[in-house]
Image (cartoon, rainbow, N blue to C red):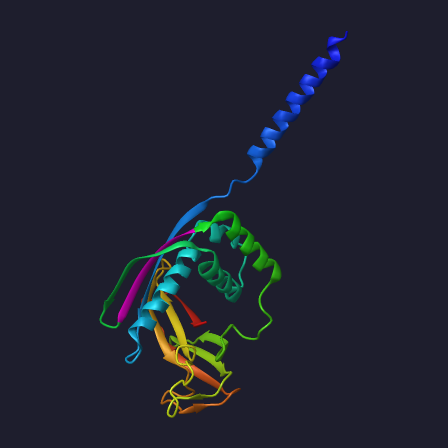
């Protein structure tokens, strides 16, 4: 009889030990997934090569995030395109580890960049859930930076993509030519994709109100950009450089 309490205590201790081991094994151990992405960009005539290369590599890294299984699974139910782009950009700039340029070259005015890196799974999932919970930023329009705001994008029956935008700062192409570093931010980017969702090419357009180009846009002025959609393009994306 005197041995029963001792045996019971031993069994209880063993059970607690097994429970602790099981709980420890059930905890997420984290990990990382490798990602790769590439981007082709058509430069402007007087655009600095360094700026074009930097933009191409930034977008290549964002594409790597967007194409990852983790990102697609976590955002599968989301249809808010601006919010999705913000989340991908946040992950690319703040979360991706071991960023490395795999390939970078130029062919005429086309700049190409392929990037690779790794996404820490637990941190990435947490960032995505946090951003989805907070929702989109309360700004009007489809996309916005410090210079421009995209108000609408509509594909017309003749294959022309009509982009309506608004100036947030004074833009003077004739006198200052984007004085104060506004050049890159004052351009509108359009990416074209084939039926498989692969990028065909990217175009950059100056934010001028008419096809002929006006020399000045004051804050609040609204302009229309008309972009011809290539026959091979199935879809497209209009965005602003942040």
State the residue in front, 13 or 120. 13
Taking the magenta stretch, the answer to whether it contains residue 116 is yes
State the residue in front, 161 or 237. 237
Query: Residue 195, position in %: x, y?
Result: 36, 60
Q: Quadrant of residue 28?
A: top right
Query: Residue 169, position in %: x, y?
Result: 49, 85
Position of residue 108 in the picture relative to residue 221 (left or right): left
Q: Is residue 231 visible?
A: no
Position of residue 23 in the picture relative to residue 150 (left or right): right
Query: Residue 108, position in %: x, y?
Result: 22, 71
Magenta range: 110-118
Give the main secondary structure, helix, strand or loop, of the magenta stretch. strand
Q: Is residue 71 visible?
A: yes
Q: Residue furthest top?
A: 1
The residue located at (46%, 75%) in the rendering is 154
The residue located at (51%, 87%) in the rendering is 219
**Rendered view: 86 above or below 161:** above
- Is the N terminus in the top left, top right, bottom left or bottom right quadrant? top right
Q: Residue furthest left?
A: 108
The residue located at (36%, 76%) in the rendering is 204
Taking the magenta stretch, the answer to whether it contains residue 117 is yes
Q: Quadrant of residue 192?
A: bottom left
Query: Residue 6, position in %: x, y?
Result: 72, 14
State the residue in front, 118 or 225. 118
Position of residue 23 in the picture relative to residue 29 (left or right): right
State the residue in front, 49 or 70. 49
């Amino acid at each position: 009889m005197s041995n029963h309490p001792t045996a019971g205590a031993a069994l209880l201790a063993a059970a607690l030990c097994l429970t602790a081991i099981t709980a420890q094994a059930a905890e997420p151990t984290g990990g990382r997934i490798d990602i790769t992405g590439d981007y082709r960009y058509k430069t402007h005539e007087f655009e600095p090569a360094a700026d074009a290369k930097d933009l191409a590599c930034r977008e290549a890294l964002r594409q790597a995030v967007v194409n990852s299984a983790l990102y697609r699974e976590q955002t599968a139910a989301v249809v808010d395109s601006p919010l999705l782009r913000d989340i991908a950009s946040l992950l690319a700039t703040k979360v991706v580890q071991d960023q490395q340029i795999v390939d970078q070259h130029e062919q005429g005015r086309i700049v190409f960049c392929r990037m690779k890196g790794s996404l820490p799974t637990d941190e990435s999932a947490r960032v995505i859930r946090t951003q989805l919970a907070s929702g989109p930023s309360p700004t009007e329009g489809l996309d916005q930076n410090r210079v421009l705001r995209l108000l609408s994008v509509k594909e017309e029956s003749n294959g022309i993509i009509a982009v309506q935008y608004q100036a947030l700062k004074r833009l003077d192409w004739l006198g200052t030519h984007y004085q104060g570093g506004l050049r890159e931010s004052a351009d509108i980017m359009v990416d074209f994709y084939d039926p498989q969702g692969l990028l065909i090419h990217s175009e950059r357009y100056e934010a001028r109100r008419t096809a002929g180009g006006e020399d000045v846009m004051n804050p609040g002025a609204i302009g229309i950009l008309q972009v011809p959609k290539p026959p091979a393009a199935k879809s497209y994306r209009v965005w602003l450089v942040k």
